[in-house]
Image: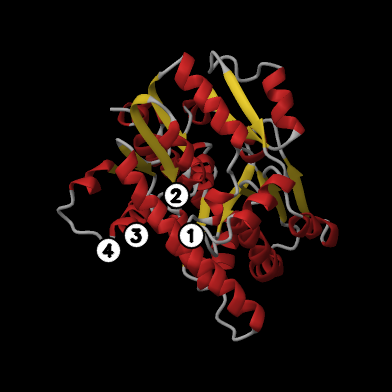
Amino acid sequence: TLLTFINSKDDERNIAEGKLDYLFDDILHVKLGIFMKFYNLVTGLLSHKPLQVLLFRSKKMRNLIKKINETNPQDISICHMIRASEYQVLIKADRKLIELTDSLSLNFARKTQNYGDKTLANFVYKFIYSIEAKRLKEAEIECLETNDKVVLVSDVDRDFILAERKEDDPLNNKLTTIPLGIPDEFFSAPLEDYDPHTIVFVGKMDYEPNEKAVIHFVKYILPLVKLIIPNVRFKIVGAVPSDRVKKLSQNDPSITVTGRVDSIIDHVSNAALSVALMQSGAGMQTKILESLALGVPVVTNKLGLEGIDLVPNVDLMVAADDNEAAKVISDLISNRTHRQKLSIEGQKAVFNKYSSSKIFTDYIS
């Protein structure tokens, strides 16, 4: 049984057309619009709960859970993200697992560091994000008390959540790190001849860290690359591009914003390289593993590499700053032999450590 929120006509169409029927016997959904989210925020201002949780409060969802509890108790309930954690408490199941993926408290704590300038707007943002980070941390700890298992994809996120807890607290053992798995089909995709002038970025483009990463790349790094390779092109592959991201392609014909695509494989596998030069965020960057699995070399930075057990400058390239990133990118595009070696090493390393077939058995054990 899938119990989910939807917020677009595409979601409704996918369910109606049965595109998820191969995974689920029953799909129950609740549409949560902008008005209801705004109402939730206003009515929850005095609550101690994180805004990320308050946004998704729904009487309809609670009623669906009540119906499931009365008619079809579950063997196991797998809840996705802290935003749905309040509903996990309501579900009757023999075993409960919550997949946090990333620590949102770490993500918001890092956001506060981006507002160092002493302006009124920055002060307000920093104040809001610091409160949200604290509330999220409390909510993540609460998940340890209400679930049998809590899953993160990165040890960095795990260490952040447990930093202030006693090491011998038995609840800590419930928090498990299981890295993201890459579907085996990525590794079987043919290593096509690539377009030597195309750089790609992959990610959901209404997610702030992805938006910030591509805007920073276009503003500070791409111009440096173009000084060496004038005809280089940059392709941003990912659903729901924000207006700021769309504007990038309007201002520069060498930049393409694809929006949602049917297959990441088709849009990434023939690129010269993939960039993941993150400026914010937390957790594990799937975009890095997906690109490497397709045999496309990756240029990232320390933040992008966080939580990924690969060897810097052997399995993928890690740049210290914008100037080094531009140099590494230019060298990879110009040096076909180096690119090919990195392509082979990166794909092999990801298959050995992050293919889904190797990781999945750890998930519900």
Mark in the foreground, 2 or 4: 4
Near-viewer residue (285 or 115) = 115
| Disc 3/disc 1 C-alpha distance (Å) | 10 Å
- What colouring does the structure picture have? secondary structure
Sequence-wise, the earlier of marks 2 and 1 is: 2
The residue most toward the left is: 168
Q: Which residue is mark 3?
A: 160
x and y, in percent, of residue 41 in the image = 63, 55
Q: Secondary structure at mark 3?
A: helix
Check residue 107 in the rendering and tell me which mark sits there, or answer none. Answer: 1
Circles 2 and 1 in contact, beta carbons < 8 Å: yes
The C terminus, quarter of image: top left
Check residue 310 in the rendering and tell me which mark sits there, or answer none. Answer: none
- Identify which amino acid the numbered label 2 is placed on: Asp
Residue 244, placed above or below residue 25: below
Q: Identify which residue is drawn at 81% across, 59% down.
A: 247
Q: Which residue is mark 2?
A: 102
- Identify which amino acid the numbered label 1 is placed on: Asn
Callout 4 crowding tier (Cα within 10 Å): few <14, some 14–19, many ≥20: few
